[in-house]
Image (cartoon, rainbow, N blue to C red):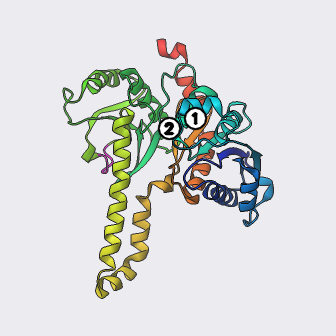
Amino acid sequence: MSEITKVVVDAMGGDNAPEQLVKGAVEAVNRRADIKVILTGDKEKIGTILASENYPTDKIEVVHTSEVIGTAESPVAAIRGKKDSSLVVAMGLVKNGEADALVTAGNTGAVLVGSQLVVGRIKGVERAPLAVLLPTAKGLSLLLDCGANVDARSSHLVQFAQMGSIYMEHIMGVKNPTVGIVNNGAEEEKGNALVKETFPLLRECKEINFVGSVEAREIPAGAVDVMVCEAFVGNVILKLTEGVAKTLMDTIKKGLMSTTRSKIGAMLAKPALKKTLKTFDISEYGGAPLLGLRGLVVKTHGSAMAIEVANSIVQCMKFKEEKISERLAAAFKPENKES
C-alpha cells in the first residue's frame, strides 16, 4: 500500500467555509485511499456536515479550534493574536511534521504572513512566491509570483525562476522547462527598472533554461513553461485570465442557447465542448502552492468550491512524492549558492 499523505485543511477559511471545505475533504478521501485529511475548525459545525456524508471515517480527523481569522483582518495581528485559529493551528501541524501539507481558502495576507512566521522559509530562499498553473494552448504554464511579493527584487525573481523550473520538471514532467520574464516587449532593453535589472541575471543563471521576455498576448499560446514576475503583475495576469475565461464561457453558452438551431447544434457538440472548456478551468488544477517553505502550503480561491478543494488536496500528494521541498532545500544550500 502507498504511503499515506496527511493534508490539513483550514475548514473555517474562505467564503464558503466550512461546508465546501469539508465536502472537498470528503471528495478527496473518497477519490484516493492514500490520503488522510485533518480538518481544523469548529468541531460541532464540521461534525454536522460530516454526518450527512459518506466516507471512510478513519481518513478524516477533526481538530477543534475556537477562533477564525476573517477576510478583513490585519494579517500580522491575526496571526499573532489568534493562536487557536483554524489557520494558525493548521500551520503548526505542518511545522511540527504532523501533516505533510496545508490547504486553505482563507485570508491571503494571513496565509502569507503565517507561512513565513509559523512554517518558515527554506534556508537560502529570500522570498516565497505563490505559483499558479495557467491553462494554455500547449498545456499548462506556471506563473510566479501571482500574489505574495508585490515589491520583489531582481534576486527574488531569479530564485522564482529556479523554483518554478524545479516544480515544472518534477511535478508536471517537463524536461528542461523554458523560462521567460513577463515584459511589455520582446527586446532586452524593454521593461521597467526591475525587468531590466533581472533580465541579464536570468540569462546568466545556469540552473534554468531562460529564453527571454514573454509578452502578455503570448501567455495563452503557451510561449514558455515558467513565467516570472513580481506579484502585482502576476496577480493582474491571473485575475484577467480568470475573468476572460469566465466571460468566454458565459458568452458561448448564451450564444448556443439563442435559437432553436443553435440549441440542436449545442446538443451535438456538448460532449466535445464540455471537454475543451474543462481544460481551461483553473479550478481543475488545484490551488497555488507557496514555494520555498519548509512545508507545503497551498492557497485556493477564497470562493473555492468542493471540487477545487479536493483537487488541491490531491495535488499535495505529488508534491510529497517528488520531494519538492527537499529538492528546493538542496538547490538553495549556501554552498550551492556560492559555487
Q: Which residues are magenta?
A: 219-223
Q: Is residue 222 a member of the stretch shown in magenta?
A: yes
Q: Secondary structure at mark 1?
A: helix
Residue type, mark 2 in image: Tyr
Asked whether disc 1 touches disc 2, contact meaning CB atoms under 8 Å apart, the reply is yes
Q: Is residue 75 shown left or right of residue 40?
A: left
Image quadrant where residue 23 sits = bottom right
Per the rendering, the mark at residue 167 is 2
Residue 144 placement (x, y as % from top left): 42, 37
Q: Is residue 128 visible?
A: yes
Q: Residues within 10 Å of mark 2 (few under 14, many from 20)?
A: many
Toward the viewer: 322 or 146?
A: 146
Real-space Cα separation, disc 1 to disc 2, in angstroms: 7 Å
Toward the viewer: 314 or 21?
A: 21
Per the rendering, the mark at residue 324 is 1
Q: Is residue 339 visible?
A: no
Q: Residue at x 30, y 50 (%)?
A: 221
Q: Residue at x 59, y 34 (%)?
A: 78
Residue 134 placement (x, y as % from top left): 41, 49
Number of numbered discs overlaid on the protein picture:
2
Q: Secondary structure at mark 2?
A: helix
Q: Is residue 139 shown left or right of residue 17?
A: left
Q: Residue at x 72, y 51 (%)?
A: 34
Q: Residues within 10 Å of mark 1 (few under 14, many from 20)?
A: many
Residue 51 placement (x, y as % from top left): 76, 64
Instruction: Give the vertical position of 249 relative to 263 (above or below).
Output: above
Q: Is residue 313 shown left or right of residue 160?
A: right
